[in-house]
Image (cartoon, helix red, strand yellow):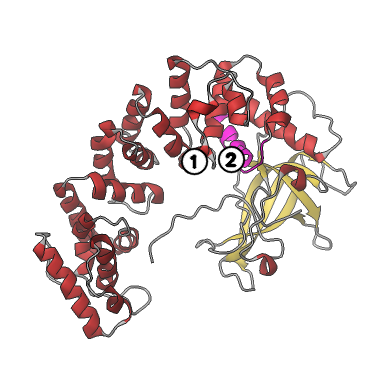
Amino acid sequence: MRAVLFFALFLCGFVLEALAGLIPSWTLAQLVKEPDLVVGRVITVQRDAPLPGPLPGVIGATAEVEVLRRFAFNETQTPEPGRRLQLRFSTYGGGGLVNGPMLVALEPGKVYVLPIRPQTESGTWRLWVENGYSVVIPVRGTLPGSEPTASTGLEVALSEIANSLARGTPSDIAGTADYVGFQANLTEELMPLLESSVGNDQNRWLEIAAGLLTGPRAGSVSISEAWPGTAPAKSLIQAVLGKVPRSPTTESMLITRILNAEPTQLSGPAMVLPQFKDSPTTIEGVRDALRRDADGSAFMAMHLVRSGQAAVVDDALARSLRVVNRPRDFPSDVMASIILLVNYGSESQLDDFSALIRRHRTANPESYNLLSRYIGGLGNPREGRILAPFLMDSRTLDDGHTRYSDSAVWRLQEATKDNFGAESARGGTIEERDAAVARAIAWLDAHGIPHEESISR
């Protein structure tokens, strides 16, 4: 089975067995309507053994949280600022979870708005709800001046979000913008708060815009529609961009901020930068990131190349060969590098790729196995050059039945649309699988693709 890049973004199962496979999306108003709220910095996260039940991969965890601010609307004994609380929650084990609830991923050092409820007897606390999108809100640690007065949880949460966007570091903005991206339109509620804090500071408006554009829904934003600055704003990003007159200078400033997004925010820059594909700032910025071997640069380059910008191809291919040589580093970059090499690389570069796969077979079996899972599925016959090493390998995979060669037959058949008998390669007898492999090797020979002799255990 091909490796799947899986990032757990927030959030956890309230009653895990009942909610398996159901992923609600909590609106801000729903989330903060009833519970007490704590703004807290996560100090440590202690992971436990896997939890019993039908969802393998779920583990219990306890976060030690330093309380920075609290809003106890229910008169519970929420710890005072400066104190610490123990927060129990369920999260993913090392392998993640597929087809289950969205689980919380609290990170030490990060600050969140946490809707909480006490857990009796043990003295620990739980999240108010634990399954779904948008259960905790990443925010900035400090507020200006005195603690704000608020009569509702919604007012508290909005002020925390606005404070993070208006005064936070790029990392603060990024986390909060990710949360906002999963919400319905909050323009009417947030813009008065932002205008009061930001005023006419165009640099800060551009910083906020870049954070919003690198969020999870950035791919749906049309810059040409969002940045005329004339019509009434229909979205928060449009309202924020409307605070800055569009010009070559401000566009370049925005692109620079998008390029500097954290590597974990790959989807936003990759989807938005093609809208600026002909800008010298975009081209030179991506080329510089590739030459610096920056995490995420291959992923950004792939989308830029696919949009028709060929100026970054050479640098992208050069870095791609470095990335596939260390497939454990950054999964999105590995996948992007394979796509770039297969679709745009020279035959010589593909031969170099094939050679490093063969080297990993003995020098680094873990990397070899990872590459066997990543390669395939592009529907391009050129994949044959990098499937050849696996096609010649009759050793079995982890399931004890399927061989590297059997998996490679299936993927080569997908790539070429020829019939090698891949169905037999997956479930047939040894003789049937050997026959399918032989037909695939004959295809390599017919197309002049070099390969070594078959190997086995």
Q: CA distance from mark 2 to mark 1?
A: 9 Å
Considering only vertical position in the picture, is 14 above or below 68? below
Residue 142 shows in the view: no
Quadrant (top left, top right, bottom left, bottom right) of the N terminus = bottom left
Q: Residue at x 34, y 41 (%)?
A: 302
Residue 9 coordinates in the image, percent (x, y): 57, 50
Within 10 Å of disc 1 (Cα), the crowding (few <14, some 14-19, many 20+) is: some
Whether label 2 touches label 1, CB < 8 Å: yes
Please, what is the three-letter code of the amino acid marked with disc 2?
Answer: Asp
Q: Magenta span has 355?
A: no
Residue bounds of the magenta highlight: 168-185
Residue 36 coordinates in the image, percent (x, y): 82, 46
Residue 454 shown left or right of residue 295 in the figure: left
Residue 71 coordinates in the image, percent (x, y): 82, 40
Please, what is the three-letter code of the amino acid marked with disc 1?
Answer: Gln
Considering only vertical position in the picture, is 51 above or below 194? below
Q: Which residue is mark 2?
A: 178
Q: Magenta span has 181?
A: yes
Q: Residue at x 23, y 70 (%)?
A: 419
Q: Residue at x 48, y 34 (%)?
A: 261
Main secondary structure type of the part rendered in magenta: helix
Residue 358 shown left or right of residue 98 in the figure: left
Quadrant (top left, top right, bottom left, bottom right) of the C terminus = bottom left
Q: Which residue is mark 1?
A: 265
Q: Residue at x 46, y 15 (%)?
A: 247
